[in-house]
Structures are given as C-alpha cells and as structure tokens.
Image: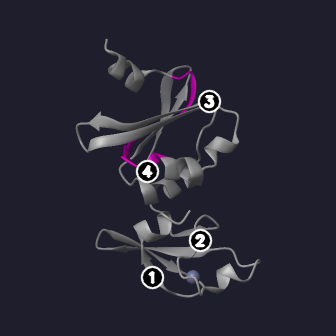
Amino acid sequence: MTMKSQLQVEAIRQGTVIDHIPAGQALNILKLFHFLDTKDRITVGFNLPSKAFGHKDIIKVENVSITEEQSNQLALFAPKATVNIIDDFKVVKKRQLSLPERITNVFKCPNSNCITHYEPVAISNFKIINNNGKIQLKCKYCEKVFDREIVTNNI
Ligand SMILES: [Zn+2]
C-alpha cells in the first residue's frame, strides 16, 4: 500500500468522518464546528484525489459524533459530503444532508449596514433559499439576499 492511500483510508476507532468535501472547504468546516477548540484528535486531508470531484478534502474527528443539525449546516458548504459516524472502527450511521430552513448565529451578515453589526443582542439569522439549485441566504434583519459563497466565506 502506498503512503498516499494509507493516509486516505486510515481508520479511526470512534468519531466522525466527513468525506467528499469540495477542495478548499475543510478549513471553513473546522471553523464552523469549532473542532479546533477541542482536545480531540483531528485529521484533515486537503486536495486528495477524488473520482467524483477531481480533488476533495476530508476531515476525521475522533470521539465526536456530529448531530443532525450540524450535518444540515454542513450542507451549506459541502452539499455532496458524506458523513459517517464511526464506532469500534465500523460505520454505524451515515447521515443524510439536507439544507436547513434557517441558520442562526453562525455567519455574519455581509451587509456592513445591517443592524446585526450594531445591536449586540441581534444574532444573525438567515433564511435558506433554494433558487433552482442555486443556494442563497436572506438576512432576517436587512432582508438582503446573498449567494451562499458570500455568506459562508464570512464565517
Ligand atoms: Zn443583514
């Protein structure tokens, strides 16, 4: 077995494997879930070869099972990601991703005039809009609509 394929298939005893992340999104996902704030062991692969995407990122987090709500937030960054919950080296659950209706308190509103930047009590709140496959987010407060990439780069 080559070094490269070993790294891709290296198993974890217990935790979560997020695979098929579009290349370049793994860092955003680490920030989204605050994985780096924990002491759990995290393995990240960047720009791994992928038959489906050309290149992909992969994240393995030990001792953490991400929730259904987190999986749905993940869908904003990586709609085709696969989430495998691992126990005793086996996949015990595969989570299906579906876009949430709303996402709160994760992203900042890209509109610098939005009240959420000035009122400490107002937490960000976006409605998710699927516009013929193009994902957009509408701010509850300023009611502006942004493309997904603009909001998710603003984490
Ligand atoms: Zn806003």
C-alpha gap between disc 2 and disc 3: 28 Å
Q: Secondary structure at mark 1?
A: strand
Tag 4 residue: 25
Q: Position of residue 30 (x, y in %)?
A: 55, 47
The amino acid beneath tag 4 is Gln
**Among the two numbered marks 4 and 3 on one chain, the one whose residue lies closer to the N terminus:** 4
The amino acid beneath tag 1 is Val
Q: Is residue 13 magenta?
A: yes
40 or 4, which is in the foreground? 4
Which residue, as the protein is rendered here, is positioned at the far top?
Answer: 1
C-alpha gap between disc 3 and disc 1: 37 Å
Tag 1 residue: 145
**Among the two numbered marks 2 and 3 on one chain, the one whose residue lies closer to the N terminus:** 3
22 relative to 84, above or below: below
Labels 1, 4: front one: 4
Q: Which residues are magenta?
A: 12-26
60 relative to 37, above or below: above
Tag 2 residue: 108
Which corner quadrant of the image does residue 135 belong to? bottom left
Position of the N terminus, as image quadrant, is top left
